[in-house]
Structures are given as structure tokens and as C-alpha cells.
Amino acid sequence: MTDKHIDFRINYKKLKIFDEFNTKDFQYPIVLSSPHSGRDFPQEFLQNSCRSESELRSSEDSFVDALIIDASNAGIPLISMNIPRTFVDVNRDKIEIDDSMFFDKVPSVDAVGSRRCRVGLGVIHRIVAQNKPIYDGLISYQEVLERIKFVYEPYHKRLKQLIDKCQKKFGFCLLVDCHSMPSKICNIMNEVKPVEFCISNLFDESCPEQISQFIGSLLSQKGYRVEFNRPYAGAFITFNYCQPRKNIHTLQLEINRSLYMDEFVYKKNDNFQTISTNISESLIALGKFLLDFQK
């Protein structure tokens, strides 16, 4: 990265930050979140990045919102991010900021940064796949504060409202944060069958083990290889919204992209509807299980 100053502003009035589905009449004590499926790039961002739109999409959880829409239509509220994570990552703490990215921010004296910051994947990403930089210079910290104000905070405000509404109605809420995994990561363990689903619950800290095991068992019965907390154990949303004393629990659901899409051209494959049906059936069954579990 050079010392070049890249100074631009976004017209947020043109952006629809997120979509929500079936958020009026909750049938089950579950809230679905798809924070990384956004693909609506602000044009000003594209014009000031040194990466192509295709390269920027390599960080995207493509079509995850579409995979789970049938479960939502059965009465499970869903909030889905429209803005890509390469612009702002709502599955990070907003303080996970890399001071070295900016031309107009004095480095914090006590700033050490998170591990994700250090590798370029904080709330504002510095890189995409294969360690490719998103910018060929330094960006404005003031502009980043606007991203947080107009994109990050509205998403989290609405997500919290849905969780609170669910908890108020049922006395219990399970937030299922939905993501996809690059097949390369799923194959890296050199085992006979790649990981197809990962159920992440911060090593049984974010929700009761019976809940994780229930949905894991459903997916296993459908013939999928399911792992718990590997290769991922959960991230910011899983950690931040977990409040066991209030009967608010979280888990992260990771889906191997090769199951349902061609990762290199961002297109659904012929198995998409089957995978969607299997996931949605499992989520609906989980919802029914939770109606009895929390009594």
C-alpha cells in the first residue's frame, strides 16, 4: 500500500442497507441473520477500489439469504444484509479498526488491534482473497465513521429489535447467524469427506449443547458431514448477542459453498433447491423443537 490518499464519500440515500422478511408474526423462537450475503456495492466504493467487483465478491456469502428464505416463509424472521462485507463487515466489533489504513487518524496509543485486524479483516477489510489489497492507498477515517453510522449500526439496531421481540413473545430466542464456507477451507483437513456444514457455538458457550446437537443430527440424517466448531467456532454476532441469563442464545451455521453454487462464477448450481429445502426443513424442525425445549 502506498501513501496515496483516497478520499471519497458515499451517498447513503441511494442504498437499501438490509432486507427483512416475515418479521411481524413470529411462529418460532428463532431469528435468522444473513450478514454477509450482500452484493449491492456503493458505486463510489467500486470507483475507488483497486479490485474488480468479481474480486470483491470473493468474500461474499453468496445466496445464503436465498437458501434460507423458505424457512423464513414458514414463520421465522430473517434479516439479510444488502451491503457487501468488503465495504463494512457487520460480523465484527466496530472497534476492530486498523489504524494503519487511514490518512487522517492519529494512531491510538493503546491500540493493539484484534487478530482479524492484523490480517486485514477487521470491521473495514483491507484485503480480499489471496491477500489482495482492496485499496492502493490510504482511505479516510471520517468516511469509515459514516459507514459505521449509516450501515453497521442500522443493521445491528434492527437485529437487536428482532431478538428482543422474539424473547418477549416466547421467553426464549435462538439467533441463527447464517454463513457459507469456501470449499477450499472445507477440504483443507485432508479427510475422506469435506465438511459440509459447521455448527458453531463458541464451544458450547453460546447455546445449550442439545440445540446444536439437534440441528446437527438433522443435517447428518440427510447425509451431510457435520462438524461442530471446526473450521469455525463463531464470530462477533454469535458472541455479542448471546445472553443465557435472558434465554437468548446464538449459533453460527456455516454451509460449504460447493454444495449449492459454482464459487468461481457466483452462480447457483443444480443442487441449490435441494440444499435450500434440506436447510429450511431442518430450521423449521429446530423451531418446533425449541417450542418444547424452552417450556
Image (cartoon, rainbow, N blue to C red):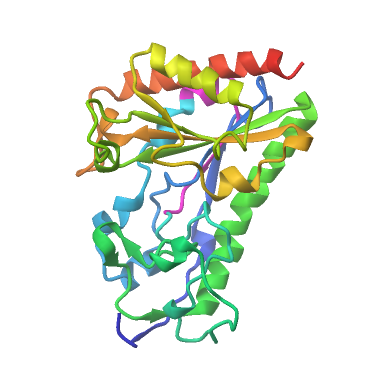
Rendered view: 3 above or below 95: below
Q: What segment is highlighted magenta in the picture?
A: 70-84
Report x, y in % for residue 230: 41, 37
Q: Place residue 171 in its image quadrant.
A: top right
Work out which quarter of the rendered image holds the N terminus and state it.
bottom left
Residue 72: within the magenta? yes
Report x, y in % for residue 6: 38, 81
Work out which quarter of the rendered image holds the C terminus and state it.
top right
Residue 10: within the magenta? no
| Residue at the image point whose x is 47% and y is 69% from the top | 10
Report x, y in % for residue 94: 58, 62
| Residue at the image point whose x is 66% and y is 44% from the top | 241
Report x, y in % for residue 189: 27, 38
Closest to the observer, 264 or 129: 129
| Residue at the image point whose x is 53% and y is 47% from the top | 18
Q: Is 130 displayed left or right of 110 in the figure?
A: left
